[in-house]
Image: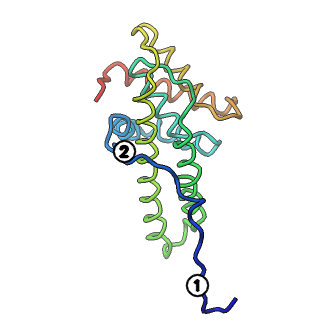
Amino acid sequence: MSLNSKITPDLSLNTMELPENLEPDNPLWQFALTFWQHLPAQKACLALQNKGWSVTRILCAGWLALNGRAYTGIEDTTVTEWRDRVTGSLRAIRTSVPKAQPSYTALRTSIANLELEAERIELALAWQHLTVHHSEQITMDEHNNLIRLNLAAAAPASGITADTRQLLSTLGDYLIALNQGYTQP
């Protein structure tokens, strides 16, 4: 092969089947923006993410619980594929760029913005799945229990450990407090 020849990658194997009618600015995204403003919840989510948890699954579990619906932990394959191929790849790239070196700050910031947009699309994909597959409504008396059960259902295959149990407790306590004044957007 000469150095002047162009390599054209075969993208047909890499193209994802994505819906055309995606709603990025949906109630789940609005909930995520509100939820993320609570620093202890944000830190708990990031700590869980570093232990292999999906923040999208945590947000879905919390949003469903606040709306009186159970989270089964089963998600559409498109959501998982998007997380693995797009959001996860951007996160891996961002975390591989040196943090302490100022000359890379603009690059890290740009990649972080792309990662946030990928997470928004991931939540929109999840939202689309959640609006099609309705779970049973529960009574208000069961909300606190539902919050904890939904968070447990968001666990990765590795399950809940002693480390993650405290983080889940922090999230559960915040969701219970949030539930007191929560109205569905």
Q: With 168 as the anchor, is 126 left or right in this view?
A: left
Label 2 environment density (alpha carbons within 10 Å; few <14, some 14–19, many ≥20): few
How many numbered discs, if any?
A: 2
Q: 176 and 12: which one is in front?
A: 12
Q: Residue at x 40, y 22 (%)?
A: 66
Question: What residue is pinned by disc 1?
Answer: 6
**Mark sitting earlier along the chain (1/2):** 1
Q: Eyeballing the image, is 45 above or below 67?
A: below
Q: Is residue 64 above or below residue 113?
A: above
Element assignment for label 2 = loop
The front one of 65 and 20 is: 20
Q: Which residue is mark 2?
A: 22
Neighbour class for label 1 at 10 Å: few (<14), some, many (≥20)? few
Q: Is residue 172 above or below residue 18?
A: above
Along the viewing direction, whichever of 72 and 58 lies nearer the viewer: 72
**Which residue does the image show at 62% across and 46% down from the upper left?**
50
Distance CA(mark 1)–CA(mark 2) = 35 Å
Q: At which x and y percent is residue 69?
A: 44, 19
Which residue is nearer to you in this view: 177 or 182? 182
